[in-house]
Amino acid sequence: MSNKQEFLPRKLILTVMAVSVTALGITGGGSWLWWQSATAPVQAQNHSQSNLPIIEIQIPEGASAAEIGTILQQAGLIRSLNAWKIWVRWSSFWQSSEGFHAGTYQLSRQAALPEIAQTIWTGKVVQASFRIKEGWSLKQMATYFEEEGWFSASEFLTATQAIPKDRYPWFLQTYLFRGFFVSRYLPNPCRSANP
């Protein structure tokens, strides 16, 4: 064999390796740039716009990660549904919790995708409180909630009829516990972020 014949396979191997490394570098760099763009906040943070509206979303009980991503994208909170799915898949390997939590969330377009996802993953739902005076009737409670802007008196009274009286006979006239009644029987127990 001549030197020329030995040199050709070596040159071919080196050329293939160089092209492969270049292609991997371009693909990796492009993927990294896409990821940075796709997970960035929808609206850039600007000190003059510090009072941008908070968007209130409702994550229903039993919603899948894909359904949550669709809700977030429709609300204009994330840029890419594909980036959401990738983040969810990657996070599921490292997070010890059982997954996303249902509830009402107040989120900002200035938050990046990982921040929004972490808020929902950890269940940082909107917390609201109210005070019911001892001895109030259901009608008085209904009037109070309507005056405070929580929900209409008729919604409240209708929801109280859905409480199983045989299981909670003590519950109906003067006691309300937010964790059970409001989140289970009323459509959206939290006030809107922008009344």
Image (spheres, rainbow, N blue to C red):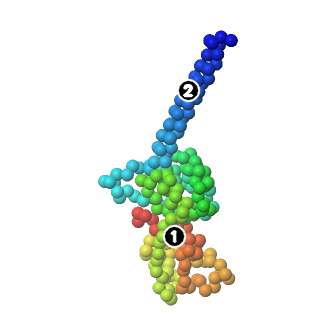
| Residue 133 horizontal/vertical position (percent) | 47, 85
The answer to whether residue 112 is visible is yes
Whole-Å distance between the Cαs marked 1 and 2? 61 Å
Q: Residue at x 49, y 48 (%)?
A: 39
Q: Quadrant of the C terminus?
A: bottom left
Above/below status of 108 relative to 27:
below
User: Going from the N terminus, do you reach mark 1 or mark 2 first?
Assistant: 2
In this rendered view, identify the residue nearer to me: 112 or 193: 112
Q: Identify the residue at the far bottom of this view.
A: 135
Q: Residue at x 58, y 23 (%)?
A: 14
Q: Quadrant of the rendered structure where residue 149 is? A: bottom left
Binning the other alpha carbons within 10 Å of mark 2 as few (below 14), some (14 to 19) or many (20 upward) gives: few
> Residue 18 — which label?
2
In this rendered view, identify the residue nearer to me: 30 or 62: 30
The answer to whether residue 65 is visible is no
Q: Residue at x 52, y 85 (%)?
A: 137
Circle 2 SS class: helix
115 sits to left or right of 185: left
Q: Quadrant of the rendered structure where residue 54 is? A: bottom left
> Residue 165 — which label?
none
188 sits to left or right of 166: left
Q: Identify the residue at the far left of this view.
A: 48
Q: Amino acid at mark 1?
A: Pro
Q: Quadrant of the N terminus?
A: top right
| Residue 83 horizontal/vertical position (percent) | 54, 46
Circle 1 SS class: loop
Q: Residue at x 62, y 77 (%)?
A: 163
Residue where numbered disc 1 is placed = 189
Closer mark to the observer between disc 1 and disc 2? 2
In this rendered view, identify the residue nearer to me: 3 or 32: 3
Q: Amino acid at mark 2?
A: Ala
